[in-house]
Image (spheres, grey):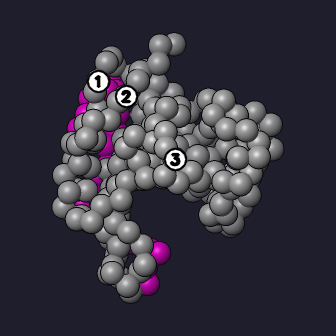
Amino acid sequence: MNRLILILILTFNFQILAKADDISDLQIEGFSIGDSLLDYFNKKQIRKSLVRIYKSDKYETAEFLNLKSFKKYDSININFLKKDNKKTIYAIHGMKDYNNIDNCLNDKSEISSEIEDLFNNVSIDENNKKKHVGDKSGKSFTYDYYITLQNKDLISISCYDWSKKSGYQDHLRISIVEKKFMDWINNEAYK
């Protein structure tokens, strides 16, 4: 299978080189679904990068912040099965900080259109604005755009508009998620 290399230019537009067959054809900062995280980092680096996000520990999350090799993102989270010695990547999340939520929303719109054009027969679900469940004040919001492929793999493009008191930075998050991981998120991760 030919890899589709997506290069992000300054406005986060994707340079489209060909149609994608599935999500493993996409890359965020060079990472692709199905790759081994060990192709990029050694076991010690991976261990140091682990963060606990979910109640269930079936999958682990490696978080990489502001690496010199990153061209467009401030951080990358990568998910893999805890008991997988190869550290096969099931989900990739790229985050870019914004000081102005309108700039994030503009980039989200452009990116959504360009990614949608890469695939045939997709399902689209757009949420223009909803309260973020993690902020009990009700003053933080997400703006989500979901592209679901026929095999139920998912690509999401979201802007997080955090309240000033939350302590979090507004950001764009692009996630490429294999169906198996998404099923775990929906059914096990928080139990």
Residue 151 in the figure: left or right of residue 48 = left
The residue positioned 47% from the left and 75% from the top of the image is 134
- In what quadrant of the picture does the C terminus appear? bottom right
Residue 65 in the figure: left or right of residue 18 = right
Q: What span is in magenta?
A: 113-136
Q: Amino acid at mark 1?
A: Ile
Helix, strand or loop at label 2? It is loop
| Displayed quadrant of residue 34 | top right
62 in magenta: no
Instruction: Work out whether 65 lies above or below 81.
Output: below
Residue 86 in the figure: left or right of residue 106 = right
Q: Amino acid at mark 3?
A: Leu
Residue 33 in the figure: left or right of residue 133 = right
Q: CA distance from mark 2 to mark 1?
A: 6 Å
Residue ID for mark 1: 16
Q: Which of the pair 48/23 is nearer the observer?
A: 48
The residue positioned 45% from the left and 37% from the top of the image is 28
Instruction: Work out whether 18 lies above or below 117.
Output: above
| Displayed quadrant of residue 85 | top right
Instruction: Please report whichever mark, 2 or 1, sits nearer to the chain's N-terminal start.
Output: 2
Give the number of the disc on residue 34. none
Q: Picture coordinates of residue 155 (x, y %)?
A: 41, 42
Helix, strand or loop at label 1? It is loop
Please say if the residues under marks 2 and 3 sit with CB atoms less than 8 Å apart.
no
- Crowding at label 3, few (<14), some or many (≥20) Cα neighbours within 10 Å? few
Residue ID for mark 2: 6
Instruction: Please report whichever mark, 2 or 3, sits nearer to the chain's N-terminal start.
Output: 2
Q: Amino acid at mark 2?
A: Leu
Please say if the residues under marks 2 and 1 sit with CB atoms less than 8 Å apart.
yes
Give the number of the disc on residue 67. 3
Between disc 1 and disc 3, the foreground one is 3
Instruction: Please report whichever mark, 1 or 3, sits nearer to the chain's N-terminal start.
Output: 1
